[in-house]
Image (cartoon, helix red, strand yellow):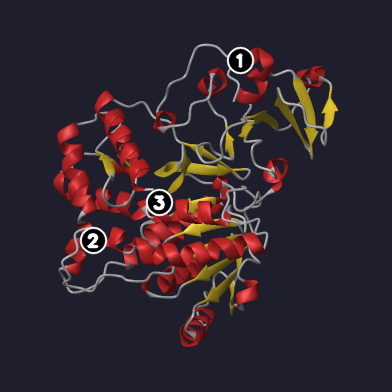
Amino acid sequence: MNNNKETYKILYKVNDHLLLTDKFYKNLETESIHKLKDYKGILLLDIDASPEKTRSYFKIDTEDVLQGYKEDVSLLWDTSLPSYPTILKDALQEGRLYGINSSYPDFKNFPQEIIKTKNLKVNIVGLGDVGGILATGLKLLSNETISSIGLYDTSPDKVSRWEQELSSIFDMSSPISPKVYSLKEEELFDCDAFIFCVSVGVPTLGSEVNDVRMAQFQGNKKVISLYGKKAREAAFKGMFFVVSDPVDLLCKAVFIESNKNEEGELDFRGIPSHRIKGFGLGVMNARAAYIASKEYPELDYINEGRVYGPHGEGLIVANSLKSYNNEASLFLTDMTKNANLKVRETGFKPYIAPALSSGALSILSALRGEPHYSSSFLGGIYMGARNSIIAGATIFEKDSMPHMLKERLKDTEEYLQALY
């Protein structure tokens, strides 16, 4: 992106919106720059940068982006500057300003994708421990958000079981309930949201594995890469949600593989980065709240605490953004990171809380445009943090942070960059 604000001098009409840029597009209709004076619709600011390192579509909420765009974890804290281009002032203050990466061949269609928040079609692939419980949560809690839940698994018996069980759940006081049905393979991407819950190579109980999530990466990567290619072939325009472990790396895998052509070259005609999200951090926030309630009963973690990063090695728990304590935060981080091992010590696999806290509850909040925890594309990695999806675009929560917490975020960023 050209950081000189004075170069934004060309205005184009893009569907029902306006695009402000310094590039010439022969296939777009120009508009008079003076039209911005009275314009009250969505304004798109051209972010022309490598899709491998820069988001595809996002909501601009602070003026620091307008002063020169740099994409890294600093976008998670408040770095507002005192001034910004006056031509964009109204759009920014009124919540109408979005960044859009014109390096994607199909960028002009991004604002038209997935903006409804009701009567959504959701398809789930993988009906193991997590997939089945997640589907149950969506069936019980969706109300008007989801109109149908499609089920798919390589085991026909699992599909039949869950279709019958879920279809037999009915609340007489709330007759609005999603229809549940089995999917054919060719129907997988006929939906608004595709949820990947396939897991292969899950370590058995009692195995000597310190990071259970990373142990599943290579097997799950092979499977999700195939579904990424299928999504590309189907010209999928919905959201691709990853619940399988490790979500952050699997999001990156499906992004890369879906955007390769038959020669294995990146052409970015697959799933853009803003339509891929990983759901693993919700349960870490819930576990941190549970642990904090026992270890620090005086702490209002639910309102003041935060989690960031992956839901394994690299996880960050902040005890409080109002009264940050590094020692307490490191203790909560360690306890939260290893909470799944504590459950495994009881002789059971820890899948119920992840399926509901990271899965069903977080996914429903995401589809409704509400704040939630998920991993979103940020500077070439998928970074977990509180965010919302507004008009199809991600907006990160920005917080005032102490120096120590910022340094922890930078360390996690470097860790994730090195992994993939």
Disc with the residue nearer the chain's start (2 vs 3): 3
Q: CA distance from mark 1 to mark 2?
A: 49 Å
Lower sequence index among marks 1 and 3: 1
Nearer the observer, 14 or 170: 14
- Residue 12: x percent and y percent? 79, 29
- Mark 2 residue crowding within 10 angstroms, few (<14) / some (14–19) / many (20+): many
Q: Is residue 183 above or below residue 41?
A: below
Q: Which residue is mark 3?
A: 248
Farthest residue toward the front? 263
Q: Amino acid at mark 1?
A: Asn
Amino acid carrying label 3: it is Asp
- Location of the N terminus by quadrant is top right
Q: Residue at x 66, y 52 (%)?
A: 116
Q: Is residue 267 left or right of residue 345?
A: right
Q: Determine the residue positioned at 58% across, 52% down.
A: 259
Residue linked to disc 2: 340
Closer-to-camera residue (373/266) = 266
Dot 2: element: helix
Q: CA distance from mark 2 to mark 3?
A: 18 Å
Residue 381 appears left or right of 269:
left
Q: Secondary structure at mark 1?
A: loop
